[in-house]
Image (spheres, rainbow, N blue to C red):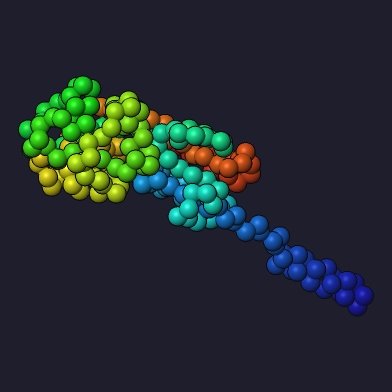
Amino acid sequence: MIKKLILLMALCALLLSCGTSAPQTPPESVSVYSTFAATPWLSDLYACADSFAVITRVDDPSTADLLLRVGEPELLSSFAYQIDEEEILIAVHRQSPIQTLTLEETQTLFAGVGDPSVQVWVYASVEDVQRVFDQLVMKGRSVASSAKIAISPSHMSDVLSREIQAVGILPRRWMIENVREVYAVGVAPVLAITPDKPEDVIARLIGCLQSK
């Protein structure tokens, strides 16, 4: 009888130990801000997060744990890591009379002293792609006050695909079927920027993005 009781207690203990699992650490929340131009890298970020992080997008870059952008900021006082690179282009409608442009022709056109029938499109001066363009092309010159403003690369793509007389600035990843390039501005780094030295989850995310 005693042996049966001991055996029953051991069996119960075994069943209890099998049914009890160690508590899992919940995924850590990481707030992310992305410029419009860096949006294509968000899909990689979500894939990297997988089961160990929850990505939350924020509208204020100053509150983000991680910031994604194209090109270097004018002032950088935090930690920046290159995760990729992006080519910046001057693009037009596929049927545009503009075939190719030189650096000098691009400068003239965007300064507003070129062909008056061409409608120049740019971004707001604070946008990362516009900063790259200003640094590599305008080099201190001002963009024409008559230039129209696109709010994002997606908006720019839509305009260029519809307007034969339009010319604008596009990252390579935003080129679409009805748009073609006429001048290659240059290549800019895609950066992941953190306010503090990245550790643990954020360090893993950046390392994963760099390996893509």
Q: Hey, which quadrant is residue 171 in on the image?
A: top left
Q: Is residue 205 above or below residue 52?
A: above
- Residue furthest out toward the bottom: 1
Whether residue 104 is visible here, answered yes or no, is: yes
Of 140 and 46, the residue lying toward us: 140
Q: Residue 92, located in which quarter of the rendered image?
A: top left
6, above or below 200, in the image: below
Query: From what the image shows, is residue 99 above or below residue 207?
Result: above
Query: Between 88 and 139, which is closer to the camera in this rendering?
Result: 139
Query: Residue 34 placed where, x, y %?
Result: 43, 47
Considering every residue shown, the one lying at the far right of the view is 2
Q: Give 103 or 22, whichever is nearer the viewer.
A: 103
**Quick check: 143 left or right of 59?**
left
Q: Position of residue 134 (x, y in %)?
A: 32, 31
Tally of numbered tags: 0
Work out which quarter of the rendered image holds the C terminus and state it: top left
Apparent side of residue 57 relative to residue 12 in the rendered image (left or right): left
Expressed as whole percent of the image width and height from the top left, the position of residue 169 reads 25, 37
In percent of width and height, residue 156 lies at 23, 45
Residue 94 seen by the camera:
no
- Residue at 32% x, 44% y is 124
The residue drawn where x is 71% and y is 60% is 22
* Identity of the residue drawn at 88% across and 71% down: 6
Looking at the rendered image, the quarter that the N terminus falls into is: bottom right
Residue sitting at x 43%, y 40%? 69
